[in-house]
Every structure is written in C-alpha cells, then in structure tokens.
Image (spheres, rainbow, N blue to C red):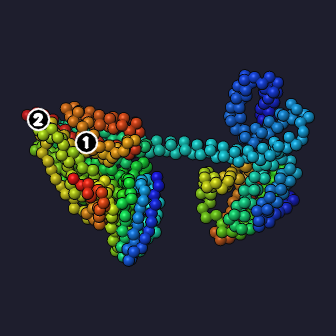
Amino acid sequence: MNLQVELLEENSVQRFKIVGEIDAFTAPKLKEKLAAVEKVVGMQAEVDLSEVGYMDSTGLGVFVGFYKAVKANEGHVKIIGVNKRLKRLFEITGLEQVMDIVMEESRDADATV
Amino acid sequence: MPQEVGKQYKELLQQYIDNRNEEDLYFGQQFSRQFIEKKIAPEDVISIHKTALAEVFPDLPEKVMYSFDFLIEMMIHYGLALREHQSLIRKQEEIQMEINVAAKVQDTLLKTKIPDFEGIDIGFITEPAKKMNGDYVYFLNDDNNVASVALADVMGKGIPAALCMSMIKFGMDSLQGENTSPRNVLDIVNRIVEKSVDDSMFISMFYGKYDARDSSFSYASAGHEPALIYRASEGGFTELDAKGLLLGVQPDVDYEERSVMLEVGDFIVMMTDGVTEVRTETGFIDEGLIKSILLEVKEESAQSIADTVYNRLLELQNFHLRDDFTIIIFKKENDLV
Amino acid sequence: MGYRSSVDIYTEWDIVAARQLGRNEAKKTGFGTVDQARITTAISELARNIYLYAGKGKIEIERFSENGLYGITIIASDEGPGIPDIRKVMEDGFSTSGGLGAGMPGVKRLMDEFKVHTESGVGTNITITKWLR
C-alpha cells in the first residue's frame, strides 16, 4: 500500500517515475500528483511504470483521466516501462490504440516466448 | 439514580475490601454493566469511587483524596473518546441501513430475465464484493431466435460503480427497436457514457448476440476481458477478442465485430476481471485454472458450469471476494429438429 | 446580570490561566469536581485552538442565574482566519483522527449549549454554557 511518485523535468519532458502498487488506496495520491500538472498546455508527459508491481482498474482510471486532460490541452502522454502483465491490460482495454505505450526493455521483453 | 448507583457501588467495594473474594469481583463485573447501560462516563465512575472510598475510610489522608481529582482530569478525554465512538457506531449503522436499501433498489432496477428458447442454454452468476455490484448483466431477447447479453464492468466497486451502472441500464433500455448489432450497441452506449461520466471513470463492456437460426454468435468488446469459446470437437478453448476501446474515453470509437459458429456442446464463457484476476495468498491464479475447472464440468448445464466456477474460486480466496464477480455461459444444446 | 471576567490568550501559559479562572468560577457556581474538570477541559480546548490557529484571542467567563437556575457561560473569541468548513470541524472523527484532542464535538459534549459564529478573515466566536442541575 505504498506508492511514490517522482517528477523529473528533462528537456521539457515531464517525467513521472512511479514506484509501488496502484490500487484503490494509493490511486487518489497518484491522481493528485498528476492533476497538479495536467492543465499545462502542450505538455509532453512520460509516465514510467517499470517499478509498478501491481495496478488495478482504479489505477487505470487515473491514467485514463490524465490522458483525457492532457489531450484536451494539446499535450501528449507516453507510458513507458510497461511489463507483460500491464501490457496485456493496456491491450485488452484498447488504450494501447490511443495512448503511446512502450514496453519494458529488460527481463520481460526477453522472456517473451 | 446516580445516588442509588453510588450506594450500591459502596456496598460492593466494602464487601470486596473485607473479603477479597473472586465472587465479589464477579459481582463487581456484573455491576459495571450498569455504568455502561446508564451511560455513566468514566470520570463519573472515578467520582463515585472517590465518594465511596471517603465513606469506607473516613480517615484517609487528604492528599490521597486529591489524587482522585487528578485521575478525574485524566479520564475526561477517555469519556469523550467513548462517546465519540458510540456516536460513530450509530452513524455507521445508519449508513449500513442506507446501503442495504440502496442495494435493494439496485437489485430491482437491474433485474434482467434470461432469454429462454430452444437451442441455447444460458446461465450466469453475478456477485458483488461488497454490498453493491459494479458488474452488470443485461439480457435482451429480441424474438424467439435471438438472445443478446451485455456484460459491463464499471471501474472500481461499491457505491460509485453502482451509481454509474444505472446509466448503462438506461442506455440499454433506449436500444429498443434500434439496430442491435454488437458494434452498433457499443457505439451507442459509448456515446452516452462519454458524455456523462467523470474523466477518470470508465466502463468495459462485452456484447454478444446469439442467433439460433444459423447458430452464430457475434460479439464486440469495449476494452473488456476476452470471452472464451469451448470447442467440443477440439476439446479445447479459444479466446474471443475484438478490438475496441473502453467506454467513456473518447466519443468516436470504431468497434470491431466478429462472429463464430457454435456446434452442439460448444459453449461461450463471458467474465469480468473479478474472475480472471483472482488473487490468492500466493498471487494471481493461473489462467489455465479457470479452463481446467470449465473442462471438468463441460457436460453440465450452463447454470451449473457458472456456479461451479464461482464456488471453486470463492473457496480459493477463503470465501472472500476482492472484486465483483460475474460469469455468463451460453451453451448450444441439441438441435430439436 | 452576571459577573464577567476574562483572560487574553497570547502564549501557552495563558491557556493555564484561562483554565484556572474557569475552574474557580465553576467551583463558585457550585459545580462538583467532575463538572469542574469538564468545564476546564472545554476551556482548555477552546483556548488552545485560539493559541494554535488564531495566534491571539480572549476567553471570557460569566456566572449567571436565570429563573432560579445557575450556570456558567464561556465565550472564546479571536480575530483569526475563521474556520473554513464548519460542518467538517463539527463532525465526529475529524479532529480526533489528526490527534488534535477533543475537538469541537468534544467541547460540545462537555457542555449543555454550544454556539459558534465564524467568518473567513474576520474571526471566530464560540459561546458555550453549562447549567447546574
């Protein structure tokens, strides 16, 4: 039930590194952190999920909301470090089609059969 | 009344001091219930004790008696905490009652009737994790040949999800007379949802339509868990997935529609993630587990298949559902021609 | 017509002075030890809120009799920021969960009457009363 969000700004890209589990308890905290910047016009956001062990539908809801808000302000959301399990979630939900999703380069990609 | 309590307390205290028997302590314990029944605060109990003590031992040093004033001061906050606790419990009971009523309203509102005609056997089970269900099953029975079902999963669970669901119901009700091809249904419902929900809310939905005239099952998915089809001729399962975005993310979505033909003994399994994402003490269940349960009972009726999967998975989670749980089975029966 | 006395609250020591005054007045009114402790605790909470959230303010204490009934009234006033969401502050579990002590519902429970008037940027005025039975 622990969640940390770090925000780094690199070459005008807002990079969020999320560490922990995203569920009904931690999602409000994540939502609050993302909401602080979602109104920035033309924001290039990058969300790193490589340290996220578990995410449920509430967590997905936070990203959907973030995606909608950023898109409404002509920005772009890129989600990186997605492991196999999360990748499946983004695939099933069709979010993969509308969001920019990059799979994790490490172990999970190698493990693909 | 407090004077009466004080008198009795003094007698019990005197008796205990004289004999120091377990029996007297037992009487004391029984007596202490009165304090709670009569809503006597902890600080008043100290005061009663102080008064009784002064009567039992009139010669106690004054300084010892002062210590009770200090103790009274100590107990004031305990007394407040106790009363706050009692008030919160009452409030909780009120909320509980409201939720019970709301759950009943939901049950009535979302009642759905399983289509019943020759050729197809339908069974389903839907159980909320808490009182109110965020999963929704809606059957449509256009005529005696076509049976359709919408299976929706509103993000999250409990009351917010349940509230959101009535919207789906009214969306589905408005379909009467419309073209009910799966892709069209999802397109209409998506437009309704997109306009009405909060930004971070979403709904996944699977829509399936069985036509007994040619034994075809057509389906479309709005970001929902893929369904499974059991092929009796092959003795195995295939996933039924179709591309489509969750409801409520954007207004214009092109939902892919696909269809399969059912043979006798084939069945389709539609589920929410409360079934596929079951977590036990040792982690997520293996996706093969659901298939192996289904294989065991494949010869049984659709309802019995659904019930078995539910009972087995409930047991695996120590009879505690973490998420709303819904499973629907469409099974093709013998043709009675 | 009552007799009114007051203590200005600037420092934490003034909270003690307000308590002392409250206890003396409660005793003079005729309250027993337990009720004296309740009245004092209520004063203590109000004075502490002034000290913590408004910086400075005043506790006034008045003994009175009405139709043969005796009682004590305490008025806590400050010119602080005001209470933004009074309904929330009056809810059980709000202040206690944050470890702030008895909170407003606690003060209300310790006394028989409780009135609060607050205005954003102007200040807060809380009047509490306890009757001698």
**Residue at the spot x=35%, y=66% of the render?**
A67
- Element class at badge 1: helix
Which residue does the numbered mark 2 point to in the structure image? B335
B184 or A42: which is nearer to us? Answer: A42
- First reached walking from the N terminus: tag 2 or tag 1: 1
Q: Are marks 2 and 1 in contact (CB under 8 Å)?
A: no
- Indicate whether B179 appears above or below B147: below
The total of numbered circles placed on residues is 2
**Residue at the spot x=87%, y=59% of the render?**
C3
Q: Residues within 10 Å of mark 2 (few under 14, many from 20)?
A: few
Q: Residues within 10 Å of mark 1 (few under 14, many from 20)?
A: few
Residue C80 in the image: x percent, y percent? Answer: 69, 68
Q: In which quarter of the image is residue B115?
A: top left
Three-letter amino acid code of the residue under disc 2: Asp
Report the Cα–Cα distance between label 2 and label 1.
31 Å
- Element class at badge 2: loop
Q: Which labelled disc corresponds to residue B288? A: 1
Q: Which labelled disc corresponds to residue B48? A: none
- Tell me which chain the residue with mark 1 is part of: B
B228 or B93: which is nearer to us? Answer: B228
Q: Quadrant of the N terminus of chain B?
A: top right
- Indicate whether B232 appears above or below A65: above
Q: Quadrant of residue C117?
A: bottom right
Residue B112 in the image: x percent, y percent? Answer: 30, 42
**Residue at the spot x=11%, y=35% of the render?**
B335
- Tell me which chain the residue with mark 2 is part of: B
Three-letter amino acid code of the residue under disc 1: Gly
The answer, for residue C28, to whether it is visible in the render is yes
C92 with respect to A69 (left or right): right
B238 with respect to B281 (left or right): left
Q: In which quarter of the image is the C terminus of chain B?
A: top left
